[in-house]
Image: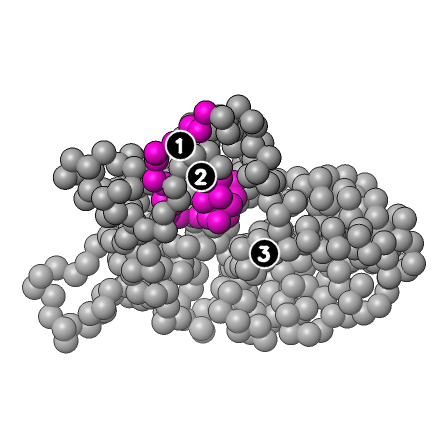
Amino acid sequence: MIPDNPADVDSTLKSSPILCGERVAFTGTLASMTHQQAMDLVGHHGGTAMQHVGHQTSILVVGEEGWPLESDGLPSMKLETARQLHDRGDPIRIVSESEWLKLLGIEPPERKSQKLYTPAMLCQLLGVSVHTIRRWERAGLIKAVKKVYRLPYFDFEEVASARRLCELAASGVKAEQISSSLQRLHSVLPNVLRPLAQLEVLARGANGLVFRDDLGLIETSGQRLFDFDPPAADHEPNDRPSTIPIRPPLLEEAAERHRWTADDWFREGCRLADGNEIGHAIEALRLATIGDPLNPSYHFHLADALYRQKKPHGAIERYHMAVELDHKFLEAWTQLGCVLSEINDSSGAQAAFQIALELHPDYPEVHFHLAGVLEQRGEKENAALHWRRYLDFDQRGPWAEIARERLTDG
């Protein structure tokens, strides 16, 4: 494991510095520690840490938690400089973070990407809303590794990759540039194949019809998309944009909407909710529940939309419907508990959270939320049990910091 204090490194390593004479630089986000901790570790192993890459640099370590890409989608300046120096014959080595730790005789700690996370935990770790995570899952941009009573668990690295790709797309970086950069990183970071597959999903525009104009692909909402197939050279600027049917439209004419099935209305409601058209989303989801009143997912998504429209009591009613139709609907029990807690019904919230834990004792955020409710009710010893239980699943995120603070204060 990585020592908390580099000064505590084994004395054998001190007496025979492994990095003696080496000048080491870092690029990308490290999974095991901060850049400053890594630089301190270099010094304690006899090497010299460098802020920049130059002719004197002998090792460049590439972090494994975040791609070394700049905001323009190009590989980091450090990585490009190292490659150029290597191609000119300079004795510089480009190694992954794992290879560097192995060189030091240190076993890499468990990475976030080796764990599985629920949507709520990813929301805290990555600053991505739960609604966005669900939208990405529906679009196929991310895939649940497993599901426990409808509750999806995701790989951290895959979701972080999706977020980064969307950030680059929003800033106007072309997909070809990102693809090229990822391919160049493949020799150092072998885990870039999934991001390349995610790029293809973004290029297809999984949310509906996509139009091509002079600048590339654009959704009907106005959102720009990655474009792997640019217009032909003879494309005239004044040509009307051609439509590209990514999936068959439900029904294009409003007059024909009376033919829509419950599933059609559900997908339309989700699309509207994704676009923050919450009022229209609620109406579409209500029609879905009318068409199929026994589908718990329809009630759950309607509850979410009602909550987003600041109608907690309407949301509570629909969450109740969801769990009545499917008693093992974990996310519905959890959301029900959270909304009940917000309206100061702590006993109802506690009951909902306890049912969720009876179904799935290893549900991290339920331990977190239940601890908060118990603390508010003055049951600090019971709350501490759940704060500690949450820390069994998460030691690095913002919720973990809150849990540790509560335990310290208690």
Judge the density around disc 3: few (<14), some (14-19), many (≥20) Cα neighbours within 10 Å.
some
Residue 204 seen in the current view: no
Which label belongs to residue 42? Answer: 2
The residue closer to the viewer here, 245 or 392, is 392
**Pointer 2 or 3: first along the chain:** 2
Q: Are marks 2 and 1 in contact (CB under 8 Å)?
A: yes
Colour mode of the rendering? one colour
**Range shown magenta:** 16-43
SS type, badge 3: helix
SS type, badge 1: loop
The residue that disc 3 covers is: 123
Residue depicted at 23% across the width and 44% down the height: 55
Which label belongs to residue 19? Answer: 1
Residue depicted at 30% across the width and 56% down the height: 73
**Pointer 2 or 1: first along the chain:** 1
Q: Residue furthest front?
A: 15
